[in-house]
Structures are given as C-alpha cells and as structure tokens.
Amino acid sequence: MEARALHDYVAKSSDELSFRTGDFLNLIDLQTSRAEFQGRTGYIPANYVELMPNHWYHGDIPRQHAEQILSRQDLPRGAFLIRASENSGGPGAFSLSVKNTSHRNLVEHYRILKNQQGQYHLWSETFFSLNQLVHHHMQHSVSRDTDLKLVDINFKEPPPVETFPAIATYRFKKEQNDELGFEPNTLIQVHVSVPGHEKSNLDSDWWFGHLQSHPEREGFFPKNYVRVDDATRHKYRLNL
C-alpha cells in the first residue's frame, strides 16, 4: 500500500528511512510500519505519513487468483488490479493484471519496473508513485500491441446468483471462448439469469452455468446436453 509523507523525517538509525514531505513510500508491513523507498527498506514513524489505499491494490495474491477475479463476466475490458509480484523484485515489486477480452489470453500481466531513482514504469514513461502510473494508463494504453487503457472500477462482490443443479447427459466440446465444455455426468450449476446476455434466458436453447467442481469455469452450453430433476423442472417451468 502506498503512503505519502506529511513531514520531513531524518533516519535516526540504520534500519530507518529518511524522506521528505510529499514523497511516496510503499508500506510493506502496516503493523510494524516497515516501508520501501528509493530501493531501500526500513522503518518509518507512522504518524509522519498518510495512507493512500486503493481498491485496485490486492496485495499478495497469486497470478491465478488475479485471473479469476478479472475474468468475471460483469467486468469490462480494461478492468485491472495491482498485486505484489510473485517472481521477482523482492519487497516493493509489483505486477499489473489487466482484462483484455480481444486477446487470446483473457487477462494480461505486466511487470511494473523500477529504475535506480525508485520511479515506476511499464515502458519509457516514469512515475513517482503507483497512483501516477495508473492515472497515466487510464489515458494511454498499457499495451504496445493494442489500445488497452485501464478502467477504474470498484471490486464489489457481484449480487448473489440464483442457480440450480443439472447433470451432463452428453459430452460437450466448447468451440467459442464464452462456452462451457464438459464430460458426461458432470455436475453443473445453471444460472437462472445472466444480465447482458440475451441467450441466457432459460427459455432459449442455450443456458449459462459453471462447473460445480470448478466455479471459475463458466460459459454457455446447449440445454439439451443436460438433465434436471422434476422438482427443478416444475419450479422454473422448464421446457426440456
């Protein structure tokens, strides 16, 4: 998490950091007030800085978890989060994960680099803080291959989804990215409605759902490839 210095501070021991008013520091541990600044780590007085929390910073989460979060159907292209880097850089190293639905990999990952002056950058432009980097790339693409700008969103939990169980009768091999493949006897949770998708209506020939064993795997499938029990059929007046 970033913090901005409210006052100048001169380190009083070798394990402390010096900084000036207006400097941006990265807090590594909130409880001990351990921070990173200009490539060095050390302790700082907590009352000399103000926290700058951001909903897009998700801390120490793995790459796979970031992909699950950003793959949500209700998030737009350009939705993003910043996380602690898994593979390099040590304390204060970050990665940027961005949803790109036009790319064969739904979520792209960028390593946020740091120069010797402690400035952040993806490409040639440098920034004193992650906030400045994010603001810049809301106006300028993070990618050199396509126009992909960051879209600031609040990661609120989606509303509860009403589902009912169904069992696969046949094998279905997905042919489109938004489809759900499965094998016979796979347990599927069918979504009663999916906002924004016309073919999600239960009266249509295609349903939307996710695998019971892997909720992150979701998509559309032909309804005649699954079966439901009589109680569910009557409750939702299903025409199967």
Image (tube, rainbow, N blue to C red):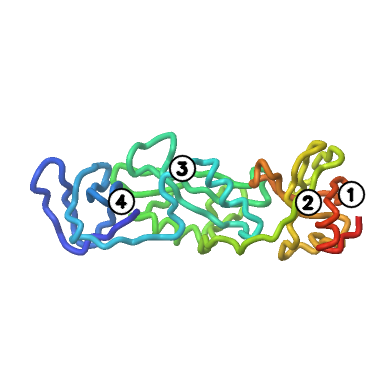
Question: Rounded to the nearest whole Å, what is the CA distance between mark 1 and mark 4?
Answer: 54 Å
Mark 2 Cα-neighbour bin, 10 Å: few <14, some 14–19, many ≥20: many
Read off the residue under disc 4: 26
Q: In this rendering, which labeled residue sits more in front, label 2 or label 1?
A: 1
For the residues bearing labels 1 and 4, Cβ distance under 8 angstroms: no
Q: Which mark is residue 111?
A: 3
Q: Earlier in the sequence, mark 2 or mark 3?
A: 3
Dot 1 falls on a residue whose secondary structure is helix
Which of the two labelled residues, at mark 1 and mark 3, occupies the earlier sequence position? 3
| Horizontal and vertical percent position of residue 234 | 85, 61
Q: CA distance from mark 2 to mark 3?
A: 33 Å
Residue type, mark 3 in image: Arg
Residue 139 seen in the current view: no
**Disc 3, SS:** strand
**Residues packed near mark 1 inside 10 Å, few (<14), some (14 to 19) or many (20 plus):** some
- Please state the horizontal and vertical placement of residue 235, each as a whole percent of the image: 81, 63
Q: Amino acid at mark 2?
A: Phe
